[in-house]
Amino acid sequence: MNGVQAIQSALEGTKGLLGMFVADFSDADLMVRPCNGANHAAWQIGNVIGGDIFFVKSQFPDVKYPELPPGFLDQHGPKGVGDDDPKHFLTKEHYLKLLADVRAVTIAELGKLKDADLDKPTTGQVRDFAPTFGKMFQMASDHTIMHAGQFSVIRRKLGKKVLF
């Protein structure tokens, strides 16, 4: 396994872990906040989807991601943080489909690189927290697991089976 393949595996694995955490969630469960001031799972999954697009398009602007519903990025960014209206969010099925489709593009774009490309510097806003292409793609995986970890707390709050 080379570096590109390792990061691709991480991206696939964290997508799967997120799906596992919410597999038995209802659409209503997606709207539960783990604690006051934290975001509900619907917002968080949307933010992960938007994160992949933001990270990759910042460096590879011609990448073609699936079309998102109108206002999706605003709703799942800072503007939508306090919104608890389920009508403004998608179903679990729709979120997981979008995540799978978006993540497939992210993994494919990474697959166009050679290991040496992972050390190439990023530019713009991404450079401050992910200074190389390798770290940027790894950040997409880390971003997923950071949000998915919060779903354990939601699971406990809802009285669902503890997974780990």
Image (spheres, rainbow, N blue to C red):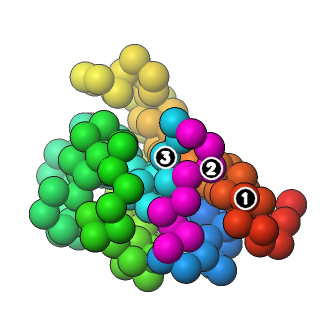
Which residue is at a point 39% across and 77% down the rendered structure image?
91
Residue of label 3: 39
Which amino acid, mark 1? Lys
Q: Find disc 2 in the rendering and name its residue.
A: 34
* Left or right, residue 65 beside residue 119: left
Q: Which residues are magenta?
A: 28-36
Numbered disc 2: secondary structure: loop
Q: Secondary structure at mark 3?
A: loop
Task: Name the quadrant of the C terminus.
Answer: bottom right
Q: Earlier in the sequence, mark 1 or mark 3?
A: 3
Which amino acid type is marked by label 3?
Asn
Q: Main secondary structure of the magenta part?
A: loop
Left or right: residue 41 versus residue 110 is right
Residue at image location 51% in from the left, 66% down from the top: 30
35 is within the stretch colored magenta:
yes
Q: Is residue 137 above or below residue 157?
A: above
Mark 2 or mark 3, which is nearer the start of the sequence?
2
Q: Are marks 2 and 1 in contact (CB under 8 Å)?
A: yes
Residue 137 seen in the figure: yes
Q: What's the CA distance linking mark 3 and mark 2? A: 7 Å
Q: Nearer the viewer, residue 117 or 85?
A: 85
Mark 1 sits on what residue?
Answer: 157
Q: Amino acid at mark 2?
A: Pro
Q: Which residue is painted at 50% across and 73% down in the image?
A: 28
**Label 2 environment density (alpha carbons within 10 Å; few <14, some 14–19, many ≥20):** some
